[in-house]
Image (cartoon, helix red, strand yellow):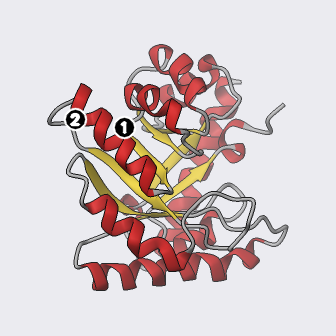
């Protein structure tokens, strides 16, 4: 299992680098997030020992259980965050990709001021780029209001945008959504007047297209850890 993860991680890194070079970008500008959802801590630790630096989890409870057993990584929350899990999330995550409503921004701001004065949490505004009613995320038309609200929270450092496009068998079908998120980011930067350097988009089946459209963070699980049981 160790050798499989080492080989898969190396292969994904090569693909990330090739995708970056293919669009005249520096491979070092792309953060590869190894998503260990549903895999036990010992498997995730193998990825870190193989060189993974950034780890992603969808559920707060999983990260709470795994982080003490997997030292030496930066932890990214890439799944929805409920208000009642916010305190636990702040204990284990270094960055939250899924800031999707003003209420959550206010809750994080309150907890940070109460428990971790002086700390600034990196966050990304999640955008429902495919306008899917079942998905979290601010609608594109609402993203500016959420962004401005989050920028008013001095304990939050807004770094950019995140999206999960609609699932499609053909990765090419995700390209318009990736492009739309990049264009939205560019417009928000201009309108609000703050840099938003990060675009978190792209997963195992489409991360190369996401990089071509401007992704700076890609969230890769299956291509590193294998199929989930």
- The answer to which of 89 and 39 lies nearer the viewer is 89
Question: Residue visible at 69% across and 27% down?
Answer: 39
State which quarter of the image contains the C terminus. Answer: top right
Q: Nearer the viewer, residue 75 or 127?
A: 127
Label 2 sits on a secondary structure element that is helix
Q: Residue at x 65, y 24 (%)?
A: 2
Residue 112 image point, x, y percent:
27, 35
Side (left or right) of 93 relative to 154: right
The location of residue 41, given as percent across then percent down, is: 60, 19
Question: On the image, numbered disc 2 is attached to which residue?
Answer: 113
Q: Quadrant of residue 160?
A: bottom left
Residue 136 shown left or right of residue 191 in the figure: right
Judge left or right: residue 96 versus residue 218.
Answer: left
Query: Dividing the image into 4 quarters, which one contains the N terminus?
Result: top right
Image quarter for residue 43? top right
73 relative position to 122: left or right: right
In-front residue for pair 112/10:
112
């Amino acid at each position: 299992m160790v050798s499989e993860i080492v080989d898969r991680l190396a292969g994904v890194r090569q693909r990330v680098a090739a995708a970056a070079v293919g669009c005249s970008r520096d491979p070092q500008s792309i953060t590869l997030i190894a998503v260990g959802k549903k895999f036990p801590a010992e498997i995730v630790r193998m990825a870190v020992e193989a060189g993974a630096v950034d780890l992603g989890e969808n559920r707060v409870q999983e990260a709470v259980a795994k982080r003490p057993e997997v030292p030496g990584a930066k932890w990214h929350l890439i799944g929805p965050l409920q208000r009642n899990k916010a305190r636990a999330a702040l204990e284990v995550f270094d960055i939250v990709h899924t800031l999707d409503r003003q209420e959550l921004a206010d809750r994080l701001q309150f907890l940070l001021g109460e428990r971790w004065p002086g700390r600034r949490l990196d966050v990304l505004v999640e955008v429902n780029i495919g306008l899917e009613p079942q998905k979290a995320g601010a609608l594109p038309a609402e993203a500016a209001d959420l962004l401005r609200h989050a920028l008013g929270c001095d304990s939050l450092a807004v770094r950019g945008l995140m999206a999960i496009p609609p699932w499609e068998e053909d990765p090419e079908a995700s390209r318009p959504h990736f492009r739309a998120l990049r264009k939205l980011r560019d417009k928000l930067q201009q309108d609000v007047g703050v840099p938003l350097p990060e675009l978190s988009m792209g997963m195992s089946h489409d991360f190369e297209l996401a990089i071509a459209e401007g992704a700076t963070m890609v969230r890769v699980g299956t291509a590193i850890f294998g199929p989930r049981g």
